[in-house]
Amino acid sequence: MSNKQMTGKRAFALWLALAAVLFWLDQWTKEWILSHYQLGEYTTITGFFNIVRAHNPGAAFSFLATAGGWQRWLFTGIGVVVGVVIAWQLYKYSHKTLFCLSLSCILGGAVGNVVDRMRHGYVVDILDFHWAGSHFPAFNLADTAITIGAILLILDELLRMKRGEQA
């Protein structure tokens, strides 16, 4: 095995490890909430932030939350396909640091939410931001990792375009 192949495999393993750490942190926080809070129970942290136990059977912003159950399998399937594609991209481009950092964040978060859907039939949300009586939809660490990953992916693309690189 060549040095380049070994370095690529090592980098790939590190990107997967980062995704696994994000997944673990997400699952740990959700398990803690499930064991310490009842559905809808919350703790006020500041005047604009609560820790809450919420269940979301839909997707982002409760999209399709009342669809009758089939959405669980649709979103699970999408998550699995996205996970496989991301893992392949991490392997293929393991030397592209910002790109792989973004994909690792997305992968860790996506797997966290897929596991929730498979185990519970819904995603456990724990973070509740609000202002003047209006609440932003509750979310979790997986959603946060996915959002950070998406922002980094856009930044990577903008930097790639600025350098004049081809995709």
Image (cartoon, helix red, strand yellow):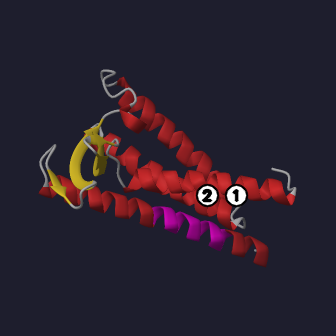
Q: How many marks?
A: 2
User: Is residue 59 among what the camera can see?
Assistant: no
Q: Is residue 160 left or right of residue 117?
A: right
Q: Is residue 59 left or right of residue 27?
A: right
Q: Are marks 1 and 2 in contact (CB under 8 Å)?
A: yes
C-alpha distance separating marks 1 and 2: 6 Å
Start and end of the magenta stretch?
Answer: 9-20
Residue occupying image coordinates x 42% and y 38% = 60
Question: Is 127 drawn above or below residue 121 in the view shown?
Answer: below
Which residue is tagged 1? 156
Q: Secondary structure at mark 2?
A: helix
Which residue is tagged 2? 152
Q: Nearer the viewer, residue 33 or 70?
A: 33
Q: Secondary structure at mark 1?
A: helix
Residue occupying image coordinates x 36% and y 33% = 62
Residue type, label 1: Asp
Quadrant of res 141: bottom left
Residue farthest to the front?
A: 132
